[in-house]
Image (cartoon, rainbow, N blue to C red):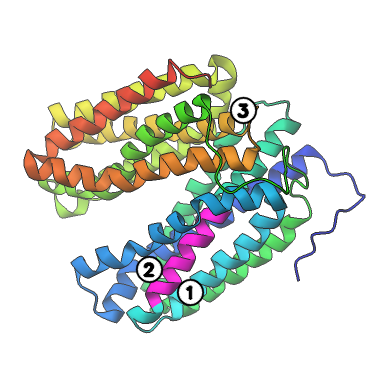
């Protein structure tokens, strides 16, 4: 059993920060571990490319089912309980993915994986907001998200090792799940114990105010850009840049590298320039990078462009979440859930929009549309109190 009793021992804000940072890393490790073995599971089950696309929709389905529930649970029970039990659920779903033998077993596990991912997303970000309060609202949210991104690189390296040594996803996922639960138990004692605005009578559905809708609009535009880069970077380098096969993944790697790096520097920048200016700068960097890749479709210029896009997308969502968590009208969990829900639809709709625009025109035109979304991030940020 996970102990959730409140200890009389005082906990320093540094210990809180380390514990919550560890949870971000563990959650990033969990998600990226699954992603690293998708090809192995696809091959083992004989799933076609089209079939895999349909199967992977199970994760956003699970997320969608719990979008309103997550904020309500955090508001009612507190983020600490939700994130600790959510980690257990997430790791358990990962085990199911590794040992599933057919689609009838895999799809329910993917839905559960989406549920666990969304519950932990809202609750761990609420924990991060609580840690920020201990630092008198000094910006530290982006560094937490940087740890999530860093975990992706670690998981990719572990996955490569496991594949190279012919270790099955089942065994691989057992080792990672055990590590995640152990790390959670070690961190649990130093998590933030009391959120602001915890309300046992909080209704499930609460209409967000104008300020939160504006923050949600920023997240929506930013996550359209981010989702498109995750799913279409390789395709763009293959079909438009016509890169050699060894360089097809270079754009995605460049984007992910600077996105992770940018998150570790975003807090420092936000403290000096202010969150609004940083978000505006990020939107301009996204638009500039994509414009370079569209107008100058060569390997060196496209790599430069994708590096800029990574910096551009790095800080927007963490800073928006930080602002939402300080809402004066809703509890941190409900405010984060509202903004996250709006942003989630951007992440979900971005990749298919790219496909539709590319089908009607060209892939370069569709990436120009994503550059326009970067400009929208800057434009909306100028009108919203961040």
Work out whether residue 298 can be spotted.
no
Nearer mark to the viewer, of 3 and 1: 3
Report the residue marked by disc 1: 172
How far from the left and from the top, in percent, is residue 317? 47, 35
Relative side of 216 to 374, left or right:
right
Relative side of 16 to 265, left or right:
right
How far from the left and from the top, in percent, is residue 325? 61, 34
Report the residue marked by disc 3: 139
Q: Distance between the residues labelled 3 and 1?
A: 36 Å
Q: Mark 3 or 1 closer to N-term?
A: 3
Q: How far apart are marks 1 and 2 (CA)?
A: 9 Å
Magenta residues, start to end: 106-119
Work out whether residue 52 can be spotted.
yes
Report the residue marked by disc 2: 37
Relative height, residue 371 to residue 65 (above, below): above
Q: How crowded is mark 2: few (under 14 residues within 10 Å), some or many (20 or more)?
A: many
Characterize the magenta stretch by its predominant secondary structure.
helix
Q: How far apart are marks 2 and 3 (CA)?
A: 35 Å
Relative side of 156 to 173, left or right:
left
C-beta proximity under 8 Å, tags 3 and 1: no
Please tell me which residue lies in front, 76 or 163: 76
- Label 2: element kind: loop
Q: Give yes or no for residue 117 being in the magenta stretch.
A: yes
């Amino acid at each position: 059993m996970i102990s959730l009793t409140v200890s009389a021992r005082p906990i320093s804000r540094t210990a809180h920060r380390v514990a919550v940072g560890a949870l971000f890393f563990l959650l990033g490790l969990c998600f990226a571990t699954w992603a690293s073995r998708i090809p192995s599971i696809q091959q083992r089950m004989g799933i076609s490319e089209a079939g895999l696309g349909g199967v992977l929709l199970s994760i956003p389905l699970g997320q969608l089912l719990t979008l309103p529930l997550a904020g309500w649970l955090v508001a009612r029970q507190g983020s600490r309980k939700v994130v600790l039990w959510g980690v257990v659920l997430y790791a358990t779903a990962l085990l199911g993915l590794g040992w599933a033998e057919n689609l009838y077993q895999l799809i329910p596990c993917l839905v559960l994986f989406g549920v666990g991912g969304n519950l932990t997303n809202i609750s761990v970000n609420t924990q991060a907001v609580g840690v920020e309060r201990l630092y008198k609202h000094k910006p530290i949210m982006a560094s937490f998200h940087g740890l999530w991104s860093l975990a992706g690189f670690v998981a990719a390296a572990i996955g490569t090792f496991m594949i190279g040594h012919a270790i099955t996803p089942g065994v691989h996922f057992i080792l990672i799940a055990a590590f995640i639960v152990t790390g959670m138990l070690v961190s649990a004692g130093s998590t933030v114990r009391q959120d602001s605005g915890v309300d046992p009578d909080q209704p499930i559905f609460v209409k967000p105010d104008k300020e939160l809708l504006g923050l949600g609009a920023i997240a929506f535009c930013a996550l359209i850009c981010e989702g498109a880069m995750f799913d279409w970077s390789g395709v763009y380098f293959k079909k438009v840049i016509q890169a050699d096969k060894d360089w097809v993944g270079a754009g995605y790697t460049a984007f992910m590298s600077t996105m992770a790096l940018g998150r570790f520097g975003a807090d420092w920048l936000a403290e000096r320039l202010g969150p609004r200016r940083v978000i505006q700068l990020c939107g301009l960097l996204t638009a500039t990078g994509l414009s370079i890749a569209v107008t100058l479709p060569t390997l060196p210029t496209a790599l430069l462009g994708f590096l800029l896009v990574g910096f551009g997308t790095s800080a927007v969502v963490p800073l928006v979440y930080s602002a939402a968590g300080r809402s004066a009208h809703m509890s941190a969990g409900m405010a984060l859930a509202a903004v996250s829900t709006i942003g989630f639809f951007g992440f979900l709709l971005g990749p298919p929009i790219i496909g539709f625009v590319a089908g009607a025109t060209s892939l370069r035109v569709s990436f120009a549309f994503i550059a326009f979304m970067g400009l929208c991030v800057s434009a909306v940020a100028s009108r919203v109190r961040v």
